[in-house]
Image: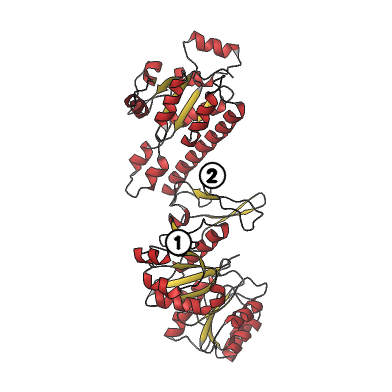
Amino acid sequence: MPPVTRALLSVSDKTGLTELARGLAELGVELLSTGGTQKHLVAAGLPVIAVSDVTGFPELLDGRVKTLHPRIHGGILADRSKADHLAALATHGIGRIDLVVVNLYPFEATIARQEVDEAEAIESIDIGGPALLRAAAKNFAGVGVVVDPRDYDEVLRSLGGAARALPDALRRRLSAKAFAHTARYDATIAGWFAADAASAAPRFPESLTLPLVRELEPRYGENPHQPSAVYRLGGGRGLLGGMRQLQGKELSWNNLLDADAARKLVSLFDEPAVVIVKHNNPCGVGRGGDLVAAYQRAFDSDPISAFGGILATNRPVEAALVEAFGELFLEVLVAPGITTDSLAALASRKNLRVLDCPVYAASRDEIELRGIDGGFLAQAPDAFADDSSTWTCPTRRKPTADERRALVFAWTVGRYTKSNAIVITNGDQTLGIGAGQMSRVDSCRLAISKSRSPLGGTVAASDAFFPFRDGLDALAAAGVEAIVQPGGSKRDDELLAAADEHALVMMLTGRRHFRH
């Protein structure tokens, strides 16, 4: 490859720009630039030629047209191995451009600001930049393309050799990075337009392109032999609503899954609430007048399983809560705010990951994806509170106000419990949870066995209908007095008769909450 003699620099993110440009100039590379980048380089005392001097045209239309010109794109796109391409450059007086250093208008950062309006967002859509990157990336055999300031040092080191050229392997890698960069950029813009037109667009479009940005690289995935990475959705709020990790070890794959489940469940409660999650299932949920009372109920639900769990709150954590959970070993603490006193009290627990996350708020336009071999399953999130006023009660005995309140609590916990899910509670606390069993009656038996106290006067929720009366019979025999379930079984009449036989309340929601 011929040496790099001419470079075009046009960047929004000017990190490392001066050092790169100075290094190129010292190697004898001629610098071309535009707008703010040119001013930045001139201010640094570097020799730079304005693109407008090359094209013979000033920057037009408030800067919308700067580099979209044959004297620029011809210099980038000419195939150096073709004599007729080189002859065309000579005929038209077009100089080659051997290195293109471009990063794009910060569209993602612009739309992330709450106060941004449509006009500002539109002006943050880069046109010339992606065209330059795609041209240089296409012609990687003769042109180097750089989109990431983290690559500047390697580029300068490579050009410092006797050939003053970029190795083929590096040019290929930088080209792939440039195409990935423009693809993500376009996907972020497409997503913004789609969200803005959500009422008119189908929920599930024929083509779905997601701008994913690698955010974390945990040591491994679910197991040590599985490499893993965590990607953030470009243009979104960020992982877990824009979390800030305030202390602790790096987050693992499993930490993030459990933190997500705990945060989503605790967000469904209006009162102060605490959720403890283990292996993506709640093992204790409590609510109360404050977080300390809620925590004590959540912990007392299953203190053995709480060890090594993920704890989430729906209120800021204060020092009293830290004192309440004392020496309990927790992997992650998730809360919408942590007071300074609380952080000071937690500082000695070096391994505890503390995440400051806003309370989860589901979007009606959100799409959940799950990978399968060869593709993805997509669905709307099951993240919105049910209207319990629509529930029906076909049994002879009707619920008291306290029973209805407890049934709503149990039903809420059940929606974030793996199917088949059975949740036994009182009004403010889980008592026994049966999750992930292959038969519903086994989930009932597991929930009963997990309880640390007699179940007389308690309630239970089932995430789907009872296919047989055996599960209901087991719950009634344990002391459960009211049950909420979707209904819809072929044996609903048999279930109703069994409920009346046991003098149970049975509420029907008409809605299922499987969680696989």
Q: How many marks?
A: 2
Quarter of the image that includes the N terminus? top right
Q: Is residue 116 left or right of residue 133?
A: left
Q: Quadrant of residue 13?
A: top left
> Residue 247's quadrant in the figure?
bottom left
Q: Position of residue 89 (x, y in %)?
A: 51, 12
Front in this rendered view, residue 380 or 260: 260
Where is residue 500 shown, x and y percent of the image? 57, 89
Q: Residues within 10 Å of mark 1 (few under 14, many from 20)?
A: many
Under mark 1, the amino acid is Val
Q: From the viewer's perspective, is residue 164 above or below residue 274?
A: above
Q: Does residue 159 appear anywhere in the picture?
A: yes
Q: State the residue position of label 2.
A: 209
Residue 324, position in %: x, y? Answer: 42, 75
* Residue type highlighted by circle 2: Thr
For label 1, the residue is: 354
- State the SS at label 2: loop
